Image (cartoon, helix red, strand yellow):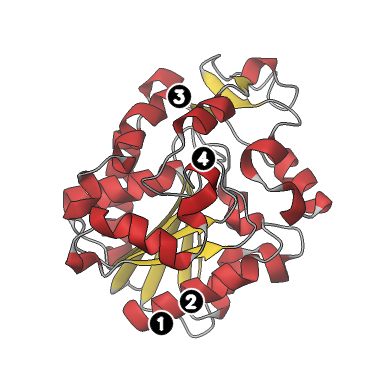
Amino acid sequence: MAATLCLPPGGSRTVMVLMSGSNFNGSYWDFGYEPQTYNFRRAMNAAGYATLVVDRLGNGDSTHPESLTLTATGTAQDLHDIVQAARQGLDGSAPFDKVVTVGHSLTSGTSVMEATSFHDVDGILLTGYSHAVNVPETLSVIATYHSSADDPEFAGRGLDPGYLTSRPGTRMHDFFDPGDVDPAVLAMDEQNKEVFSLTEYPDGMLSTLPGMSNFITAPVFIVVGGRDRMLCGIDYATCANSATLQAEEAPFFAPEARLRTFVLPGSGHAVNLARNTTDYQAAVVDWLNSTVGN
């Protein structure tokens, strides 16, 4: 797996392990356009936290095995291995005392799976994740995928036909709210789009069903865009504000999780790329400072 470690000036005893969702790669966390606004990795480093941006297998700069071999369960095991490696020291850096896993969409589910299986992290940031999945809307997004072999962005790269990607021009509808995205951000997002395998979805979606997340024993922070069509239930009622999301999610977590939630108003699924994403970055830093520490 490909990964990039970034340390803040003076170092940090806490590292955030960042994995992107199925339609994105590491550039989602390390966005190149107007980084002072949209670059989550940079914001966390500025707040004093180390970051490790990881492309899971079949994603970004990591190797691409046969698509049918990819599962969320396998990625959860990989994430566990990374957490353990971080505590031993990465890329010549000193061992980290604390590790926070950070996921988006599919990899938020992976973080839940890792945390409930191994109980070895100090905090879990789940973005683009909730238990109020709007199934019809989610299926309508999946219907916009096609084989990467049929996409001009990936044709000729030698990927097997089981690797999928979003059809050109569909990401606005799937991952953004039209009133909350800079056209230049949308263009770069389209340029950075990624491949994935549907075999990663079945076990990954289990994390959004009642039961699994109740076994998490580390602090949890959930962030959802207020206009996320896949995760906000009917009429976006679940994501009306942070309090409504808290009320919806609280039954799915044990007291040990010390659950906190945040709704980014107006944002679609890609909260890192919303116009007001710095509000979400500030909320994450506040949670880290009060819960985990650097």
Task: Establish if 282 lies above or below 253.
Answer: below
* Disc 4 secondary structure class: loop
Q: Which residue is mark 1?
A: 289
Q: Can you give x and y, in whole percent of width and height, for residue 15 in the image?
A: 40, 69
Specify few, some or many for label 4: CA neighbours under 10 Å numbering under 14, 14-19, or 20 or more: many
Task: Estimate the spatial distance between the alpha carbons at disc 3 and disc 1, rounded to whole Å.
Answer: 36 Å
Residue that label 4 marks: 230
Q: Is residue 66 visible?
A: no
For image coordinates 59% across by 56% down, the residue present is 271
Horizontal arrangement in the rendering, residue 107 relative to residue 44 (left or right):
left
- Residue at image mark 2: 285
Tell which tag, 4 or 3, sits nearer the viewer: 4
Displayed quadrant of residue 279: bottom right
In percent of width and height, residue 81 lies at: 28, 50
Foreground: disc 1 or disc 4: 4
Residue 119: x percent and y percent? 18, 57
- Whichever of labels 2 and 4 marks the residue nearer the N terminus, that label is 4
- Disc number for residue 198: 3
Q: Amino acid at mark 3?
A: Leu
